[in-house]
């Protein structure tokens, strides 16, 4: 969770004498073998308070309630419900950390996380979470994605100092852990940027050098070999810092080359590196190196690489610079993941001529908190089901159990271990391997859990009961269109699992190059991919247990490819992410298997996704609104999870907040029929209210015809016999400007181009607004003057006989309909939204509206009168300013009521129109008088709008609580 240099900086600030004193107190208790046995024998409730006293009071410096000046509680009740945390840390009376405790019988601390974070979320200013089983302790900041874990019974002095830094009272009080995290994140960002700059600089320089010195090879081939060389070098840098190779082996090679040059022995530097590559592949031992044969394919003999010529100076400069990074403590696999993904962007640039090049919007490196969530809720759910089937429960693994019981328990563990090794997990568009890496981390943790239970039961030292290479070769599968993606995926998996003097796993049979969606060579050429033939062992068992990923979308496809996808998969399949969803669920996943994808939020609501939404509906069990995951990508994202052949009546609705998913509740799938899309991020009371609003059975489409204005922007000018309005020219208060002019004759009497009687105008683009909270603003205008032409950035709603257009104008601008549309039509999206028929077809209006129009018409007339007075006052003010002060009328001057007089004069000064003291005295009275008049009119408008909202709430039959729900949002 923390960068080593940041930790070291803060450790140096700790008081040495205090640390020594606390270390002695800690070891006297937690390293005492007898105490450890007593703790292991204790039940949760027996030692909870004792644990808080022994660790938090005697070692970490807290004062336990009810002592005077206490800052540690033994119990803390949730704000929202009656549940209680086992402890809490207070700073100046504010809850800063919650503590959740279990006995040592609870082996898997991950199972405690949901409960602990529920407590945290109940307290607004709580930043930290501590969970422990009295033997192990985990410390979290803000979210579940990263944590520090400490084995209290085996803690070294260095680890204790780290624990003390995180949890001592004086450090929590000074927000030291938060500062540690913030500075570590900042340093990680800095390292990522600097490393990528050096990495990409090396890559570009190497590619240019290869082009210059190896003219017989095709440029694209040389670019691919550039990437492969960089992959080899990255493995070496990582391996020499993590103990897989001799430390500083790169520098040794560089010094050896320098020495040979000084001795006037002809030798190019690349030849020494080629030899080193061969050593890593085959193994070697000499005076400087003792290299194990790691093999695995990365360093397999490559005739092209062997034949290349590379400049000495270039190779020396860049390998020296990159080898200076600390790949053990500073550069983790996730940082490399971002760099790998950028490498794929570079590849796309060099392969842009390919007609089937996929758009990279869909394959940005997926953040860990996303991959971890999907993995936990696909692989993790299967694991939980299997453990429940086998009856594996932590508490049962008691070392005091009888021999026969122990034997049966061990058999369960062995059965589960073999089941784990038989799982098949696939990412059909693996990119740089983010999801497969997350799956690997999860499976390694699950095997570790099995080993812990076994060690606890048998009271023997924990052994590694699995080989990480076995997980790679048996559990993980991936396919990608790009050869380089596949190589980078392999490299990232090797870096995470490489172990000293153990061969790298052979990934050639599991991670493959191919077009996942097309099996016909006539269309995909040599990239055509037949899943059944490529992975026969998997499909002999019915398919993959889990399919996960972030499939690409928006790919540029040929006409033949589009037809193939539409015909092979589902309607709309030419959008690749739709075809990947059908492929993953229908063709790759076995019955009972889980799928989890992160894809564009359009999946939830867009019309082109309707067939795939309907197809998956019965088995969907969770939808999470992720908003914008990547700053570089405008589209919002959504996670969906489904279990094949396991239909449910409801699905969980979640929202990504920060880096954590918050489940809002369970939503009935009947709402899909009611609202036409997957509702998401909706609270239960909001859904109940929406169903009540919708229950009238009457919609805008039933009382008005909605159509766009005309398409004639290209003939608009400053000449003509009729003025033209566009979307920006209409506001709720009326027509505020014009777009230009046209001649009526040029519009051919097209009715769409003119304002009809009894019509309401609406801006076609519906604005999404983020402050003070996310919402939308429908901008409807009642045009009292109708002698205008309108373009297609305006929608015109012509109201049916018996209904008054003024009433519809009021309704469309109400809090209620804007609240409803944002959640139950626009799916809380931040995308560009259009006010077309798909919206008005679903926008409900009160059933008794027709006979209750009179009161609303009265309010509308009052409102229109106020708006006229506002427009008149604004015109008077701006005309006088323009005429008398010779000033340009800027937006701030137009809306002068929001300015102070000082701000108004400052706005004039920007135009080099500075008022003299005499002028200021004259104009101040005028300004303040007109401002007061404007504010009084706006107060009147607000009062009328409140009255309108009140009438509308009554027409829909809303209670006070329901009104509060709308207005608070």
Image (cartoon, rainbow, N blue to C red):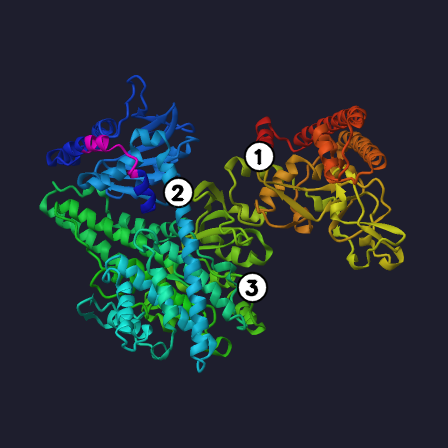
For the question of whether residue 803 can be seen, the reply is no
Q: Is residue 286 above or below residue 702?
A: below
Percent coordinates x, y for residue 560 in the rendering: 56, 74
Residue found farthest to the left: 403
**Gap between marks 1 and 2 measured at Cα:** 35 Å
Closer to the N terminus: mark 1 or mark 2?
2
Residue in the picture at 35% in, 80% down: 307
As drawn, is 505 to the left or to the right of 727?
A: left
For the question of whether residue 40 can be seen, the reply is yes
Which of discs 1 and 2 lies nearer the camera? The answer is: 2
Q: Which residue is mark 1?
A: 969
Residue 920 occupies which quadrant of the picture? top right
Percent coordinates x, y for residue 898 in the rendering: 70, 31
Dot 1 alpha-carbon crowd within 10 angstroms: few under 14, some 14 to 19, many 20 or more: few
State which region is magenta: 11-23
Q: Which residue is mark 2?
A: 183
Q: Which residue is mark 3?
A: 571
Q: Callout 1: helix, strand or loop?
A: loop
Based on the picture, tell me whether residue 685 belongs to the magenta stretch. Answer: no
As drawn, is 451 to the left or to the right of 76?
A: left
């Amino acid at each position: 969770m923390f960068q080593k240099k940041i930790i070291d900086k803060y450790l140096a600030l700790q008081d040495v004498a205090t640390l020594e004193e606390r270390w002695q107190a800690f070891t006297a208790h937690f390293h005492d073998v007898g105490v450890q046995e007593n703790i292991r024998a204790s039940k949760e409730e027996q030692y909870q308070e004792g644990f808080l006293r022994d660790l938090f009071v005697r070692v970490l410096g807290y004062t336990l309630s009810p002592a005077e000046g206490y800052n540690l509680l033994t119990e803390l009740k949730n704000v929202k419900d009656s549940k209680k945390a086992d402890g809490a840390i207070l700073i100046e009376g504010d809850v800063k950390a919650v503590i959740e405790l279990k006995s040592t019988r609870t082996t898997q601390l991950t199972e405690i996380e949901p409960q602990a974070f529920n407590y945290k979320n109940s307290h607004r200013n709580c930043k930290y979470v501590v969970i422990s089983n009295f033997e192990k302790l985990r410390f979290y900041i803000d979210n579940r994605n990263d944590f520090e874990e400490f084995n209290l019974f085996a803690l070294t002095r260095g680890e204790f100092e780290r624990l003390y830094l995180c949890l001592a009272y004086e450090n929590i009080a000074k927000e030291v852990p938060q500062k540690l995290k913030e500075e570590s994140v900042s340093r990680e960002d800095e390292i990522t940027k600097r490393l990528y700059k050096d990495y990409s600089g090396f890559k570009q320089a190497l590619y240019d050098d290869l082009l210059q010195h190896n003219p017989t090879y095709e440029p694209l081939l040389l670019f691919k070999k550039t990437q492969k060389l960089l992959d080899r070098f990255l493995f070496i840098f990582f391996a020499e810092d993590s103990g897989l190779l001799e430390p500083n082996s790169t520098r040794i090679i560089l010094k050896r080359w320098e020495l040979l040059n000084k001795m006037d022995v002809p030798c190019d530097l690349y030849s020494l590196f080629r030899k080193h590559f061969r050593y890593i592949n085959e193994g070697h031992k000499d005076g400087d190196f003792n290299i194990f044969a790691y093999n695995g394919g990365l360093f397999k003999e490559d005739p092209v690489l062997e034949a290349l010529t590379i400049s000495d100076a270039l190779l020396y400069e860049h390998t020296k610079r990159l080898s200076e990074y600390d790949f053990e403590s500073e550069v983790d696999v996730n940082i490399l993941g971002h760099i790998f993904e950028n490498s794929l962007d570079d590849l796309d640039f060099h392969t842009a001529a390919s007609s089937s090049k996929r758009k990279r919007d869909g394959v940005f490196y997926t953040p860990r908190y996303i991959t971890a969530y999907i993995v936990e809720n696909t692989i993790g759910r299967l694991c939980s089901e299997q453990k429940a089937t086998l009856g594996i429960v932590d508490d049962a693994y008691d070392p005091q159990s009888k021999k026969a019981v122990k034997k049966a328990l061990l058999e369960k563990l062995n059965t589960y271990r073999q089941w784990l090794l038989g799982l098949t997990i696939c990412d059909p568009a693996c990119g740089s391997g983010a999801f497969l890496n997350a799956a690997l981390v999860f499976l390694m943790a699950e095997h570790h859990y099995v080993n812990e239970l076994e060690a606890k039961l048998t009271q023997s030292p924990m052994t590694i009961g699995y080989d990480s290479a076995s997980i790679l070769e048996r559990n993980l599968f991936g396919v990608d269109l790009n050869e380089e993606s596949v190589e980078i995926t392999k490299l990232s998996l090797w870096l995470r699992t490489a172990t000293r003097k153990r061969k790298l796993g052979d990934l050639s049979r599991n991670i493959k190059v191919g077009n996942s969606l097309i099996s016909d060579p006539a269309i995909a050429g040599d990239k055509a991919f037949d899943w059944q033939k490529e992975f026969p062992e998997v499909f002999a068992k019915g398919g993959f247990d889990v399919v996960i990923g972030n499939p690409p979308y928006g790919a540029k496809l040929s006409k033949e490819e589009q037809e193939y996808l539409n015909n092979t998969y589902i309607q709309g399949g030419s959008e690749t992410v739709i075809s990947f969803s059908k492929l993953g669920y229908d063709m790759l996943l076995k019955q009972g298997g889980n799928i989890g994808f992160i894809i564009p939020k359009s999946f939830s609501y867009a019309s082109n996704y309707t067939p795939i939404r309907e197809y998956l509906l019965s088995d969907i069990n969770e939808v999470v609104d992720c908003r914008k995951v990547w700053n570089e990508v405008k589209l919002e994202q959504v996670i969906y999870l489904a279990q094949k052949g396991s239909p449910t009546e409801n699905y969980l609705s979640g929202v990504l907040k920060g880096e954590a998913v918050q489940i809002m509740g369970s939503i009935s799938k009947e709402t899909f029929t009611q609202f036409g899309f997957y509702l998401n991020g909706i609270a239960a009371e909001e859904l109940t209210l929406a169903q009540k609003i919708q229950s009238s059975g009457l919609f805008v489409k039933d009382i008005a015809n909605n159509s766009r204005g005309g398409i004639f922007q290209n003939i608009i000018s400053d000449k003509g016999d009729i003025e033209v309005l566009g979307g920006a020219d209409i506001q709720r208060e009326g027509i505020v400007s014009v777009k230009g002019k046209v001649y009526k004759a040029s519009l051919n009497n097209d009715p769409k181009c003119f304002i009809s009687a009894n019509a309401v105008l609406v801006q076609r683009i519906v604005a999404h607004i983020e402050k003070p909270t996310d919402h939308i603003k429908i901008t409807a205008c009642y045009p009292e003057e109708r002698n205008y032409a309108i373009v297609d950035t305006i929608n015109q709603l012509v109201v049916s006989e018996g209904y008054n257009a003024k009433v519809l104008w009021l309704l469309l601008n109400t809090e209620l309909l804007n609240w409803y549309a944002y959640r139950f039509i626009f799916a809380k999206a931040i995308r560009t939204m259009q006010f077309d028929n798909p919206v008005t077809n679903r926008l409900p209006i009160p059933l008794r509206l027709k006979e209750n129009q009179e009161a609303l018409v009265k309010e509308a007339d009052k409102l229109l009168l106020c708006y006229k007075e506002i427009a008149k006052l604004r015109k008077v003010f701006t005309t006088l300013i323009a005429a008398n002060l010779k000033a340009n009328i800027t937006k701030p001057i137009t809306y002068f009521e929001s300015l102070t007089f000082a701000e108004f004069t400052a706005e004039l000064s920007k135009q080099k129109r500075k008022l003299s003291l005499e002028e200021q005295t004259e104009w101040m009275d005028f300004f303040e008088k007109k401002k007061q008049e404007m504010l009084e009119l706006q107060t009147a408008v607000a009062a009328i709008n409140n009255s309108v909202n009140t009438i509308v709430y009554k027409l829909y039959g809303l209670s006070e609580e329901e009104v509060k729900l709308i207005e608070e949002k």
